[in-house]
Image: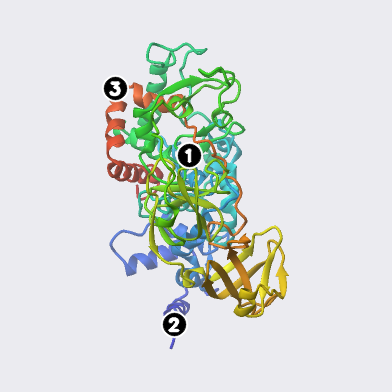
Amino acid sequence: MTHPMDMVLETLRKHDPSGDGTIGSDELLRLLNVLDNSGYWDKEKVDTILQTSGADVTTGRVKLEALIHSLYDETNSYGAVRAELLRVMDSPEWDDGSYAPILIRLGWHSSGTYNKDDGSGGSNGATMRHDLEASDPENGGLHHARAFLEGVKAKFPWISYADLWILAAYVALEHTGGPVIPFTGGRRDAEASQAVAPGRLPGAEHGLADGMEVDADGRLKGWENLAQHIRGVFGRMGFDDQETVALITGGHVYGRCHTESSGYAGAWVENPTRFSNEYAVDMVGDKWIAVTHDTKMPDGGPVPDEVRPAPGKRQYIDLSKYMPEEGEQEAREAPDCAAHPPGRYRCVSQWVNVREHPDVQSPIIGRVSQEQMLTLVAVKVFGTAVRGLAERGGWVSIVGSAGKQLFQREGDLDGQPLRGRYRVAAAGGALYFESKADVSANASTGRMSTNDEFCVGEVDVADGVIVGKRADPGPGQDSWVLLYSPEHGLACELVVQGYNEKPRKPIVGQTGHQMMLVSDMVLLWDPEFKKHLEVYAEDEEKLKADFGKAYRRLTELGCPWS
């Protein structure tokens, strides 16, 4: 059967006025306006099509074959780019285990330069590629996001940087439980002459008085100037107070500050990789104290490293997290471990930490989100918490130390979800056996080395011992590899896409300390900002809806269809 692509290409060849098998902007525009007289097609849209089809930079013309292949090739679709972004989004290599927060920030900052008075700035142009705009101190650290996306750009060279940055931000929001924003492509990359000089993005301490003098409510002197600065920056783009609060409250639930990039340190919320209204809830309900690099805390100690700003910088930290009030946790007896046997478990909390060891103070190596399913191969009581060992490595609390149920048991140990790719995790390697009978007899025939990876096509569970039959070529092929046993622990961990393609390591945020920039705190101090902040502290769904609308508008300012 003839492909529609071939039929269209043949038609264009028959009516090719150039005679050289190419088409330019004016010709394509005339053709499209004949086929579609709605007025939708203009020169800018047509030029975008030619650019993504590989038009010659000198003549502006593209070969007919390249144009048609570009339109029909499934790899030249935003859906394919979205799939690739999702594939690489989560990684133990970055901060809290996900690139999503910094991609959301990239989308925000590449758009936040827009000026409604003259139409300059905004996402249409991706002008942060150029030194003038990239050097803005408020864009510190975003070179990591731009470099990360180069791998995606290399796979899909037809997409503009401007579209890629915004699409990546939208995918990141959706992936982390945030608003789902419809994407419209068509942004074009601009030359260096269009880059925006530093000064248009909000400054965290703009207008503050020097020093650490605070009023009776703990507000740094000059905060009113900073509030007006924030209002002015967002007003320049056309946003009112409600939209301003929505954008900051939704955006600052993600990621963390780094002293090497901005001079500030720490995350705004406990889990900076999932959407929530925790930013608003904590700002309204918790106790906050202004600190500098050398501030002494009420107990005489230094500011915790995780939220300690660089010398010369000022920020706020959550005092209620630093010094919990007495009586917050009642004494509990150790729970009954037998009520929570190994098996399939579903996360029923918004998120749960995954720690390296059963000790609830051991390093956090990842997080599990609500409704996510895990196979817990072993369960033990540690203090007043019931802890489960996940098939992918790491321990989670089934029941927290304070008695909160965090996971719901959904079924017994099942070999079906345990099939897949494994990595040997045990320091001494993993034993393998010729038959299941040899497993029972502990008569191994060999040992795989630490970090070896292999595929398991069949899993057997008996008496708490889990073995998998190796299906791919290599040591122990067609043998039964020990995955877990009470004696050896977790010998091999299931490799899960987006979680541990590379071995997990401790994430950046370990202590739970939180910070706010002074520019965040003005949302609480300014009466007009505060009334919107309090609404979002009470209603997460409204925040998600309002943030999604405002973020879409922000990222489309200055675009042809905006």
Q: Nearer the viewer, mark 3 or mark 2?
A: 3
> Looking at the image, is mark 3 or mark 1 earlier in the sequence?
1
- Label 3 and label 2: CA atoms lie apart by 63 Å
Q: Residues within 10 Å of mark 2 (few under 14, many from 20)?
A: few
- Image mark for residue 109: 1
Name the foreground residue: 282 vs 200.
Answer: 282
Residue under numbered circle 3: 527
- First along the sequence among labels 3 and 2: 2
Q: Residue, x 62% and y 57% (percent of image)? A: 502
From mark 1 to mark 2, how far is it between C-alphas? 43 Å
Q: Is residue 362 above or below residue 175?
A: above
Question: Is residue 254 toward the left or the right of residue 276 in the image?
Answer: right
- Amino acid on which the number 1 mark rests in the picture: His
Residue shown at 42% from the left, 21% from the top: 226
Residue 541 placement (x, y as % from top left): 29, 45
Quadrant where the N terminus sits is bottom left
Q: Is residue 210 left or right of residue 426?
A: left
Q: Which mark is residue 3?
A: 2
Q: Is residue 206 above or below residue 341?
A: above
Judging depth in this view, the residue of 369 and 168 nearest the camera is 369
Q: Nearer the viewer, mark 3 or mark 1?
A: 3
- Element on which disc 1 rests: helix
Q: Residues within 10 Å of mark 1 (few under 14, many from 20)?
A: many
* Camera sees residue 478: yes
Q: Nearer the viewer, mark 1 or mark 2?
A: 1
Amino acid bearing label 2: His
Q: Please, what secondary structure does the residue beneath circle 3 have?
A: helix
x and y percentages locating residue 47 in the rendered image: 46, 58
